[in-house]
Image (cartoon, coloured by chain):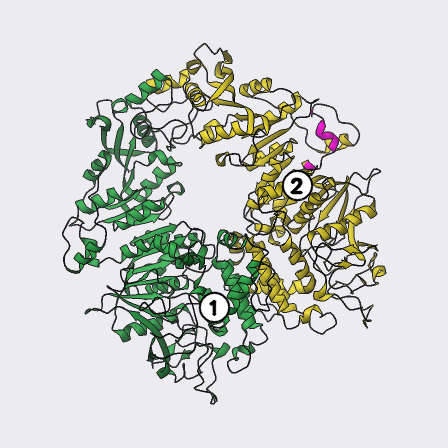
Chain colours: A green, B yellow
């Protein structure tokens, strides 16, 4: 593994170093909290990269996870590493040459923004001055500027009011206002940062053009919730916890906090990642200075990580932030989630990771299903990785999903311009920097399909491959915005389709189309995919439910050449084209003939509106009355159900 | 869910109730421990059911898991529930009418056998008398018989020597000796109990006829190990732990122990089980008397379970037993595992559970692969369930895997008797009680295969279905013991095959045959399965590696009737037999013709030794020179590779 992959979590990046580029702003108006109570004034600590443009249209909000902070990336070559260095920077997916990037510490945290370590009634000590550009001691070691607490001048501790994701967003909203930002170009975050992004758009449906939610969920699983409960129990039963009033005491609840962190660590790693890291030397711990058990290599690792965490993170903050995450709940069923996102005007990009068992991919899929049922613009990819939940921070995985992020952040005007036009202005420099899209090459069947899709149609392409057909449809009708969506299951193809600026979701057609509602599309296409489908009848019925019309294209198994091959050689039929495989390793699952498909469609009660037949091997169009079942190797059928 | 399914773990069964049926024996000879040190004398507490027969051949050892004890089952209707009531009792799979069942508390435990709560130097207090048949206070509250510890009369506490699974087995070995048992009929256990069973047979290869290891592993995963480390850290950092010397103090390390138990609970449950139990009322906790967090329903559940555990289990024992489990390591690669089990003479039954993520099925498979490579008698089934690791204790899952256990415990003499003979004596009553096996009905292809298998062959049947062919082979050559093994992937078929007394392992043929070594079998059969295989070439090559000869039977896709159907109707070929499916829902993955298969075999360099063709639909044998590719619907080919 490279050194960046060695880094299995944020810990190796995080440090106690002062936040030398942090800025601070005070919000003097009291913040009324969702669950009752208020904070009289809020201090917000944040970092920025890049420059806000004239119309404040290039601002991107980056939201950190539970143990993160404002230092998402380096500001210069000499700066401390940031937790998302692979994603944020000059020329990177979140391009600081183009965007004004803002990353605030969350409310309830301990890295500059108001949190439980701050003085009650003050919502932050007067060390404001000490923060602006000067070294700032970690909040777990508050500045001695108030050595003798006055009455009412005691830290909140465990009495810090219960805050929610909504409260965190409110503080960020005030920050946006103070920076003159009325609409974000994008809001991006992973894990708890993803919760923030989703909370933003559900509360302020017009707040951003793009919402990018990574390794996240609409609520924690009961298992994740259980782990958080145990972590908090460990902290709160630490003998030095003292109801959270430990700041002026000689000892802090470091044991409980370390145990909480050890637990978190295991949940961030996949089983495979732990095996790879700890199995080879299971019984050979590296001994560190610690009272924690170090009989096994995983033990010394956990002891090290646990203890390191306590030097930079505050126990009360851990309780406050984990509780906010545990209370976060956008809905546990599709209807409720649809209510949540109903009014959003942004487009969505969701990314999950296959080995993430803390925020499992199914949870992202719940959100995706609600968004697609609402007909929102959404792209969803489940990235295959063995890095677990931490993958969203791992360089190798960032290299995989980064291009998706980059594509969704292309200039807005570019989204309406077909790739054949010459770019101008800012777009020109962007286009020059990115790959030029080659004009798409369509198959004969795809050309036929292209011809019969009316302008302005809402189109769903099932098994959309690399998105060539969808892109061609978009380009053909460039003057008329069309609702286009692809469904694909192969990761590389999903990425290729998304890179064309199309919406595509990671979906196995053999599960039907539960993401979509009745008559959501004018046309549902199943192009050159029928032979790969297990549940053919179920899928055709779903196509008819979801679309007003269906179009299928498929290779004809009864094609003359194949029949000859079968009859004369007595072998499994084989001919140039989709059936050019040996019987024993053909990827095809189904072997449809035109006659079979006709029979089935009639059985299903559909009306066939159009039939287009080709002998592609001879570049010859076959008329419908010229025995296509014998003479055509390819068929395109358009149909509907009354 | 039924009330038994409500029970998600052992906790609802376990109680503080005295072990009214427990017996005790003292072993006065010092026990030298594997990792150094010794225990001067050992007290072993155990329970028994049934009666030992005259030649001590009907004894079954039942091994409990980490938080279990000797009370595996009720002794009578008025007795307290046992943790394996569904498996042990009159007429149950571990039939107390037939067997003498023994369940001891493990060394290092706190339910009667010597453990950390016992007095140093004594290895147990003089409350021996109090144990025999009288009420025995839970070991976490030692009897006040030694109120004033004499010098050297202090409990071991955390100074209890480090013990291993090997040490536990030694104590059980002494118990066996004391009961006059030289060879067990079976050793059965789940989780840590499974570790004990595996440790027994690896140390004493002739100790038992049958080894039944459930929901277990050759070692813990690094993830499971990490969780144990955290649990011990929680206990050992509890302010009341006092180096394990808490017995005479007013407070015990109940907080740390409760936290350890909460963590364990989450690992025993599947994600799905937790969602089902806690999602519906996530925000509605049932408030119990507890200082632990109870904001969420899962929180109050964990608080309840954690606290309940501390009333019946000793913290030092938890540390001792979890450490023994963590040190347990039979090998991390196949070679090492093969060394471990090389000399075992017993047959094996391994069972895993699909949603068990603490002892994942892959770990059982590692053991199975080593055993099959050693040519041991082994049956393996992965039971589909959403109950997680706890499944081995859940009534519904016991009902599924119980019959496997019951079958493996059938009278030994019965294993050599074909089902057509009349049973006599003890066998007669057993046979009367169990289902009579109906004579098997073979297909024409299977009859052909049966004819060409020589007596005494070692036979592997890939995709063995319900085991009819293997059973027929066994019965045909009843006078010659044959090595027969089946491979199947469908749970019901695995169970059916095992119920015929055959060895069968749960295996996906598309992964090749890595469990087996070169030339392990005389004959490898692929009967009526070829059409279901994805990796045909790879599987054929594996068959040739693993067996001296291969026999395949398959339906012929070039059969006359199918050709006619294709040519005249222009539809995907369909005819009575294996190809009698519509094109869109045929379960067949491959469509082999006799000519195709011949071609492929020749390409692979094999020699075809025998060809048998049938037109089964006409009950007609087809000669090899009578154009079988046209006239036969079924083929059987026997081949080998030089």
Q: Is residue B101 magenta?
A: no
**Numbered disc 2: what chain?**
B
Q: Quadrant of residue A43?
A: bottom left
Q: Which residues are magenta?
A: B408-420
Q: Secondary structure at mark 1?
A: helix
Residue located 42% across and 25% down the image? B591
Q: Position of residue B341 (x, y in %)?
A: 66, 41
Query: Which residue in the protein does label 1 denote?
Result: A323
**Which chain contains the residue that carries disc 1?**
A
Badge count: 2
> Whole-percent x and y of residue A593?
32, 27
Say whether residue B519 is left or right of residue B244.
Answer: left
Q: Are there few (<14), some (14-19), or many (20+) residues within 10 Å of tag 1?
A: many
Q: Nearer the viewer, mark 2 or mark 1?
A: 2
Q: Is residue A584 left or right of residue B428?
A: left
Task: Tell me residue A25's x, y (percent).
Answer: 32, 78
Residue A155, placed above or below residue B568 = below
Compared with A617, B226 (above or below) is below
């Amino acid at each position: 593994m490279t050194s960046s992959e060695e880094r299995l979590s944020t810990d190796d990046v995080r440090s106690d170093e002062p936040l030398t580029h942090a800025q601070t702003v005070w919000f003097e108006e009291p913040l009324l909290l969702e669950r009752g109570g208020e904070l009289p004034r809020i201090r917000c600590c944040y970092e920025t990269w890049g420059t806000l443009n004239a119309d404040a249209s290039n601002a991107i909000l980056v939201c950190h996870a539970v143990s993160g902070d404002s230092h998402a990336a380096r500001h210069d070559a000499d700066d401390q590493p940031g937790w998302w260095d692979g994603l944020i920077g000059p020329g990177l997916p979140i391009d600081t040459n183009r965007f004004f990037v803002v990353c605030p510490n969350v409310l309830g945290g301990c890295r500059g923004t108001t949190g439980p370590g701050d003085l009650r009634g003050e919502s932050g000590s007067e060390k404001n001055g000490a923060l602006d550009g000067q070294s700032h001691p970690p909040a777990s070691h508050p500045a001695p500027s108030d050595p003798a607490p006055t009455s009412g001048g005691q830290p909140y501790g465990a009495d810090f009011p219960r805050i929610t994701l909504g409260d965190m967003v409110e503080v960020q909203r005030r920050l946006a206002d103070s920076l003159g930002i009325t609409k974000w170009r994008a809001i991006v975050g992973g894990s708890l940062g993803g919760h923030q992004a989703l909370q933003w758009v559900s509360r302020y449906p017009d707040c951003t053009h793009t919402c990018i939610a990574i390794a996240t969920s609409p609520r924690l699983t009961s298992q994740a919730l259980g782990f958080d409960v145990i972590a908090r129990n460990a902290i709160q039963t630490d003998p030095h916890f003292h109801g959270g009033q430990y700041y002026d005491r000689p000892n802090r609840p470091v044991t409980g906090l370390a145990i909480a962190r050890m637990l978190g660590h295991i949940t961030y790693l996949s089983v495979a990642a732990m095996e790879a890291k700890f199995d080879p030397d299971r019984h050979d711990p590296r001994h560190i200075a610690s009272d924690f058990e170090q009989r096994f290599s995983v033990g010394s690792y956990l002891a090290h990580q646990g203890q390191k965490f306590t030097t930079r993170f505050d126990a009360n903050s851990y309780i406050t932030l984990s509780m906010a995450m545990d209370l976060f709940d956008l809905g546990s069923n599709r209807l409720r989630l649809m209510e949540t996102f109903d009014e959003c005007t942004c487009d969505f990009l969701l990314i999950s990771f296959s080995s993430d068992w803390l925020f499992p991919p199914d949870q992202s899929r719940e959100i995706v299903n609600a968004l697609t049922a609402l007909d929102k613009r959404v792209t969803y990819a489940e990235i295959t990785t063995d890095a677990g939940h931490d993958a969203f921070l791992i360089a190798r995985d960032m290299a995989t999903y980064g291009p998706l992020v980059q594509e969704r952040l292309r200039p807005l005007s570019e989204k309406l311009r077909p790739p054949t036009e010459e770019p101008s202005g800012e777009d020109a420099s962007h286009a020059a920097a990115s790959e030029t899209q080659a004009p798409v090459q369509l198959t004969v069947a795809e050309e036929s399909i292209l011809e019969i899709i009316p302008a302005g149609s809402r189109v769903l392409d099932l098994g959309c491959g690399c998105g060539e057909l969808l892109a061609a449809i978009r380009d053909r009708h460039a003057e008329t915005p069309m609702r286009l969506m692809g469904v694909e299951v192969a990761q590389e193809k999903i990425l290729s389709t998304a890179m064309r600026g199309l919406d595509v979701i990671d979906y196995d057609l053999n599960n039907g189309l539960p993401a979509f509602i009745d008559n959501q599309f004018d046309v549902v296409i199943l192009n050159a995919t029928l032979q790969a489908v297990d549940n053919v009848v179920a899928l055709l019925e779903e196509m008819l439910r979801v679309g007003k019309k269906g179009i299928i294209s498929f290779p004809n198994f009864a094609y003359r050449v194949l029949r000859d091959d079968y009859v004369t050689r007595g072998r499994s039929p084989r001919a140039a084209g989709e059936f050019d495989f040996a019987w024993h390793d053909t990827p095809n699952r189904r072997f449809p003939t035109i006659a079979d498909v006709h029979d089935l469609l009639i059985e299903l009660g559909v009306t066939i509106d159009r039939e287009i037949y080709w002998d592609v091997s001879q570049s010859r169009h076959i008329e419908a009355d010229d025995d296509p079942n014998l003479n055509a190797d390819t068929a395109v059928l358009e149909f509907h159900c009354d």
